[in-house]
Amino acid sequence: MSTVPDHGLKEMVPVFGPEALGVGAHGSFHAALERLSAQGDLKARLLLSALSHFAAKGYDGVQVKEVAEEAGVSKPTLYYHFGSKEGLFRQLCLVSLSSMAARIQAMVAPLLAEPVKGREAVEAACLQLSRSYLGLLLESQEFTGFILRSIAVPSPDSNFRDLMPLVERGLSPLGLFMNHVFGTSLDMARKEVLLFTSLVGSLIEEKLRDPNYQITDAEIAWATRRWLHGALG
């Protein structure tokens, strides 16, 4: 079910790609890892354990021994499959980011299929995109917290910055949407993606702090219109 990495620190191939995870228009990578783990896949079990620890403690706060013990294996077994703590972290990033890229591409595809003309149609399409993107982030709050923490406060030891091109590539279908709807250049669309993801991402911060907090549709509309105000001028 998975490929075998060579444990090189610059390894860029995920041990589970979107096809292996069965991720497309629907289904989170977290749920897919749980399914594979239940089927006896040891790498999936280790990645699930790693996700909970890295999300809660950040890269520097995680001990490999804790991850291995939660997965029910020894440290040498973990090292056999992932090479090092950095190798484990890197594979978790690669698996999650490749899954996210596939989901975003599937999310945007229907919005690119037809022309979007007129202010009302543009706002409706943008609201649909905001709801879908927010729903993706909320599917696995551990994953969202893990990625946001890694971007905001990357540990020098984790080499997460090497993976930032993958983050941008995963978000690139959003840029195609901006180009399709607003006719912006792809370079400007990239900047619009940063604004969009920041505004929509701000809605989830309170949710990450308080699991009982409910994001309302009015808040989603507010964030979308704030972004549209700048995009439409």
Image (cartoon, helix red, strand yellow):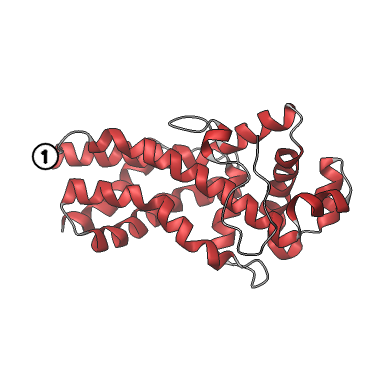
Tell me the kind of residue under disc 1. Answer: Lys
Along the viewing direction, whichever of 121 and 87 lies nearer the viewer? 87
Residue located at (56% from left, 46% from top): 96
Quadrant where the C terminus sits is bottom left
Residue 134 seen by the camera: no
Along the viewing direction, whichever of 94 and 154 lies nearer the viewer? 94
- Dividing the picture into quadrants, the one containing residue 63 is bottom right
Find residue 121 and report its horizontal and vertical position in percent. Answer: 16, 36
Find residue 81 and report its horizontal and vertical position in percent. Answer: 76, 49
Whether residue 155 sits left or right of residue 215 in the image: it is right
How crowded pointer 1 is (Cα within 10 Å; few <14, some 14-19, many 20+) is rated as: few
Total labels drawn: 1
Along the viewing direction, whichever of 96 and 118 lies nearer the viewer? 96
Residue 47 seen by the camera: yes
Whether residue 216 sits left or right of residue 228 in the image: it is right
Quadrant where the N terminus sits is top right
Residue extending farthest left: 118
Residue extending farthest bottom: 156
Whether residue 96 sits left or right of residue 36 in the image: it is left
Residue located at (61% from left, 59% from top): 11
Find residue 86 and report its horizontal and vertical position in percent. Answer: 70, 62
Residue located at (18% from left, 41% from top): 122
Residue located at (31% from left, 36% from top): 109
Along the viewing direction, whichever of 213 and 189 lies nearer the viewer? 189
Query: Which residue is the site of mark 1?
Result: 117
Please, what secondary structure does the residue beneath circle 1 have?
Answer: loop
